[in-house]
Image (spheres, grey):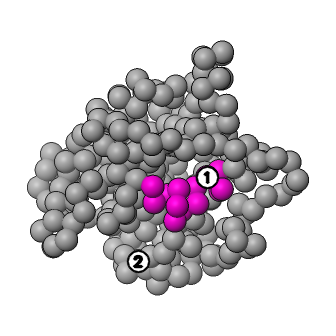
Amino acid sequence: MNRIFVFFTATILCAGMIAGCSPKSNKPLHAGTVVRDTIQGTPCCVYLPQNYEARVAKNKEVFPVLYLQHGMYGIEDDWTTQGRLVEIMDSLLQSGEVKEMVVIMPDNCPHRPTSDEERANAMSGEWESHFAAFMAESEAKYSISDDPSLRAIAGLSMGGFHTMHISHFLHGEFAYIGLFSPAIRPTASHLVYDNWENEVRTLLADEPLYWIGIGKEDFLYEYVAEYRRWLEANHLEYTYYESAGGHTWDNWQDYICRFLKKLFH
């Protein structure tokens, strides 16, 4: 039976932090750290759990991984600056609502688009087709799992588009997939997109967490609604969360908070 989980709510800020992500006790925060790196020639920010280097050196600890992508015109530190990823992760770790993980945030659009043509090129299939090599080098550089059950991918807007098409092109590689205010349908011709509808069917037959979030005032709302109708017509399971507001960081902070809580349980 097709199961579709739908949540309707408003985005609420509480004491400077997204509701549900604010500290719930006086315990010290886990104090994850962010380093800058270059992976497969791509600038990245990488969130590392507390005492990552010592734990890897001493115990050869291997962590789950989330690949988290920004939107068009963004850069690799968007999620740590505007998205407040570090504060959200540390608060959720403090309350015991998430597992420790490495979060790799690539610059998934290294050439800032300034025209319609360049915007189209940002969603040309090139980044998605490169992602397997990007993951392989990430796994060589960091102590992260190559088990799909311990691997997640998510992104906002253009990064949600990249997430959607990476996940079906590399189907079976991610147990958790998060589309935040995503663009949906490709306009370019590329191997990644040539059979995308059938590949989405194959992907969702394996029942990963397929989480879609969008605001009711988002300019991409109708495109997401159309995609949801297609998923439902094909009896494909997904989780849907609808907030108030539009294409904003308030919403994306809310979405990443909710998505993180669902990972690696």
Residue 173 image position (x, y, % from top left): 40, 35
The residue drawn where x is 70% and y is 44% is 31
User: Which sits in the foreground, 69 or 36?
Assistant: 36
Predominant secondary structure, magenta span: helix
Of residue 236 and residue 62, the one placed in the foreground of this image is 62
Queried whether the magenta region covers residue 79, the answer comes back as yes
Q: Residue at x 24, y 63 (%)?
A: 112
Question: Does the CB distance between marks 1 and 2 fall below 8 Å?
Answer: no
Callout 1: SS: helix
Residue range highlighted in magenta: 77-89
* The disc label shown at residue 221, or none: 2
Indicate the amino acid at tag 2: Tyr
Question: Would you say 131 lies left or right of 191 here?
Answer: right
Residue projecting furthest to the right: 26
Quarter holding residue 179? bottom left
**Mark 2 closeness class: few <14, some 14–19, many ≥20 residues within 10 Å:** many
Where does residue 37 sit, x and y in percent of width and height? 41, 39
- Residue 172: in sight, yes or no? no
The answer to whether residue 66 is above or below residue 193 is above
Decide which of 223, 260 is in the foreground and name it. Answer: 260
Residue 129: x and y in percent read: 23, 42
Q: Which mark is residue 54?
A: none
Of marks 1 and 2, the one in the foreground: 1
According to the picture, the residue beneath numbered tag 1 turns out to be: 86
Q: Residue at x 63, y 78 (%)?
A: 10
In the visual, does 128 lie left or right of 257?
Answer: left
Per the image, label 2 sits on a secondary structure element best described as helix
Instruction: Say which amino acid is labelled 1.
Output: Val
